[in-house]
Image (cartoon, rainbow, N blue to C red):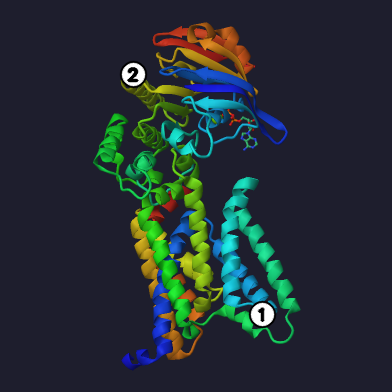
Amino acid sequence: MILLRNISVAHRHEFALLDISLSVGRGEFVVILGPNGAGKTTLLKVINGLCRPTSGSGEIFGQVMNSSNAGGIRRAIGYVPQIMNIDPRFPITAYEVVSFGRISKAGLFRQLGKIDKQVIEQAMSLTGIEQLADRPIGHLSGGEQQKVAIARAIAQEPELLLLDEPTSNLDLSAQQTITSLIETIYLEKKITTVMVTHLLHHIPHHAQRLILMKKGEIIKDGKRDELMDEQTLSELYDCQLSKSYIMSGTLFTPEKK
Amino acid sequence: MIELFSYKFMQNALLAALIGGASCGVTGVFVVLMRIPFISVAMSHAAFAGAVLGILTGVNPLMLAIVFSLASAFLIGPIADKADIDTNISIGIIFSIVLGIAFLCMGLIKGPKTEALKYIWGNILMVSSNNIILMAIVLILVSLFIILLFKEMKAVLFSRELSAASGIPEKKIYYIMLFLSGLVVSLNLNTIGGLLIFSLIVNPAAAAYQLTYSVKRMFLLSASFGILSTLTGLFCSYLFDVPSGAVIILISSSLFGIALLFSPKRKVKHYATA
Ligand SMILES: Nc1ncnc2c1ncn2[C@@H]1O[C@H](COP(=O)(O)OP(=O)(O)OP(=O)(O)O)[C@@H](O)[C@H]1O
Ligand SMILES: [Mg+2]
């Protein structure tokens, strides 16, 4: 489904990605971990073509992306970006933002049809934001905006979901809600999912593959059970982590320096 | 008052006020939501540069004015994207280039430069029928774009990145909006003038922005405010013999002030800054 060969991305003198090769199959749930600046966001943007690699090649859904097929490919990719700064006075409602997910499916010069509206409403009820429909998007809290973004991505009925820190800026209960929401979506719709996160204890159970990134490189790529250990994660984040067991699972906490 | 409109020039002026007010009001919505208010200043100076070059070389000034502002409107988007800079910076670059050209040509023109200054000041009482036909065509084009591509346009105004990521032809839509803004500015220069058109584009839309959370309503309100400003400007300029452009600015600014007073959004702002 995703196939990247020796991808590098350079911003002037610095590499954001360095010789990355990666393949993700249909139906996989992959979680990407790594310290700030590791290149996680850049990797997601290379996958959906928002960022052009300096070198290397890639295929998505078996096609090499170019300017003529980019629209069609991206239509099948739901993307939830890391941060959005929204002007509280911007004249767009939550419903309209979710409906943006249907626009390119409907096509130019056409209005959204009955089916589109059904899909939008389903996406909103799945994410539990029906009652926010008519609120201006800028008036919503960070967590509510995050749910709107996820609803928009689902409304696209994508084959691939790219989630960039969907639980950032959220309170503890919202983190849990969003994490289980993502899990539900994955189970219900079997959408191939690639998710970036910093919250080790919120990695959904069904995410069996972990990719560890550091300084633009993939340093480990493998099974979750093998990589979720003190040694590996301490190296990844360059700080000594200690492991403790709690009721709901394992907790990694950094030790004081 | 009625017999006023039996004069051909007054009929033309009235049409120019209606069409110009509506087109500037509508274009203002793009400009305000894209956060590029100075595009109108850059475009009008591009038109001015074209006109001055026309006068210098003996080519039709209006035609060169249009060519110049369209070429600039065409370049703003791609320059910003290729150089990976903010659209406002790209507008600044275009602005400085056309200003350079305008000053160069002004320096080269021998004798009085009043002909060139016409494009800076404009006069709604002197608009020709041909100009009005062009203005009407542009208003129709802009309206067609908004009606036919309303959903895409909304998405691109909200976020270019999100639109691109979901497969909307974001670049084309964005460039078309820039291009139409340039077109509206260049064809309305004769009416209100290059220096003043800025306020007729920004003020009505900024006023409408204060009053609604719906893009559709924002277009309608902004167009109405634009028309109200130009019509009042026209009558005041006729009745009291004052410059129409100045009245248009004062009216549109007052509309913004009134909108601000009655804005339901002001509370949001206070909370945000508190
Ligand atoms: N447009 C840009 N220009 C210059 N450098 C950039 C640009 N975008 C990203 N970078 C650099 O590329 C590197 C990787 O950035 P990226 O956003 O992919 O990191 P990340 O892993 O997502 O980090 P975070 O956890 O903070 O979100 C960083 O060092 C960043 O400074
Ligand atoms: Mg990131």
Whether residue B204 is situated above or below residue A138 in the rendered picture: below
Residue placed at 64% from the left, 85% from the top? B114
Judging by the rendered image, the residue that carries numbered circle 2 is: A187
Share a chain, discs 1 and 2? no
Q: Amino acid at mark 2?
A: Leu
Specify whether B111 is left or right of A173. right
At mark 1, the secondary structure is loop
Residue B210 position by quadrant = bottom left
Judging by the rendered image, the residue that carries numbered circle 1 is: B58
Report x, y in % for residue A224.
49, 10
Whether the residue carrying mark 2 lies under 8 Å from ligand 2 is answered with no
At mark 2, the secondary structure is helix
Report x, y in % for residue B207.
42, 64
Report x, y in % for residue B35.
51, 55
Residue placed at 72% from the left, 74% from the top? B105
Report x, y in % for residue B258.
39, 68
Whether residue A164 is situated above or below residue B86 in the rendered picture: above
Q: What chain does badge 1 belong to? A: B
User: In front: A191, or A237?
Assistant: A191
